[in-house]
Image (spheres, helix red, strand yellow):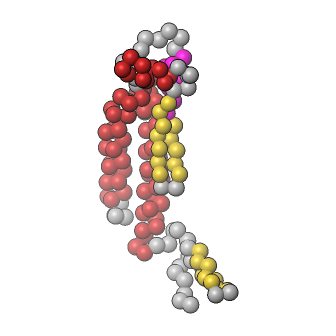
Amino acid sequence: MPAPAAGSKATGSGGGIHWVSNPFFGANGTAVLVLKMEAGLAAVTKGFANNVEEYAKEHAPWENRTGDARNGLRATAEQRLVSYTITLFHTVDYGIWLEVRWDGKYAIILPTIEHMGHELMDRLQIALIANAATGLI
């Protein structure tokens, strides 16, 4: 059996091989690059969810009666392995009707996504360029 790479461990028994690799050791620092990119993407996504929520609350096209619908707009960020999601949603039970009734006259979710999506892509591009400037790419 060949010697494992630095930071890795290989064991063999019963005709099988079990390989455990240390993610901090990779050819030409690729593993370090991936970890830094994932951390950067997670930070951008989490921070941007706050911006999405603020934008939606500020630009909601309806007049407040109780303030519950506007205050109930929420945006969350979630990371699962290498998948990043920002979810914008209503917490009031009638939020769906604001989105779909009257031909979307009071909709805020889709308009927010359409407006903020470009800014998110710009921020992600900046983050990737910053990683490239460090010489890791």
- In the visual, does 20 lie left or right of 127? right
Query: Number of marks in the image?
Result: 0
Q: Is residue 59 visible?
A: no
- Residue at coordinates 47% horizontally, 51% vertically from top-left? 83
x, y percent for residue 136: 37, 64
Which region shows up in magenta? 68-75
Q: Residue at the right extreme?
A: 14
Q: Position of residue 79 (x, y in %)?
A: 52, 49
Closer-to-camera residue (119/130): 119
The residue at the point 48 percent across, 55 percent down is 82
Q: Is residue 39 magenta?
A: no
Q: Give the camera-side residue of 123 and 88.
A: 88
Up/down of 132 relative to 103, above or below: below
Q: Is residue 11 left or right of residue 25?
A: right
Whether 122 is drawn above or below 89: the answer is below
The structure residue drawn at horizontal position 36% and vertical position 41%, both measured from the top left corner, is: 120
Quadrant where the N terminus sits is: bottom right
Residue 24, horizontal then vertical, whole percent = 51, 68
Q: Name the quadrant of the C terminus.
A: bottom left
Residue at 54% over, 83% down: 4
Relative horizontal placement of residue 126, taking residue 40 as reference (left or right)? left
Residue 25 visible in the current orientation:
yes
Check the image and name the residue furthest to the top. Answer: 65
In the rendered image, which quarter is residue 128 located in? bottom left
Q: Is residue 74 magenta?
A: yes
Q: Residue furthest bottom?
A: 1
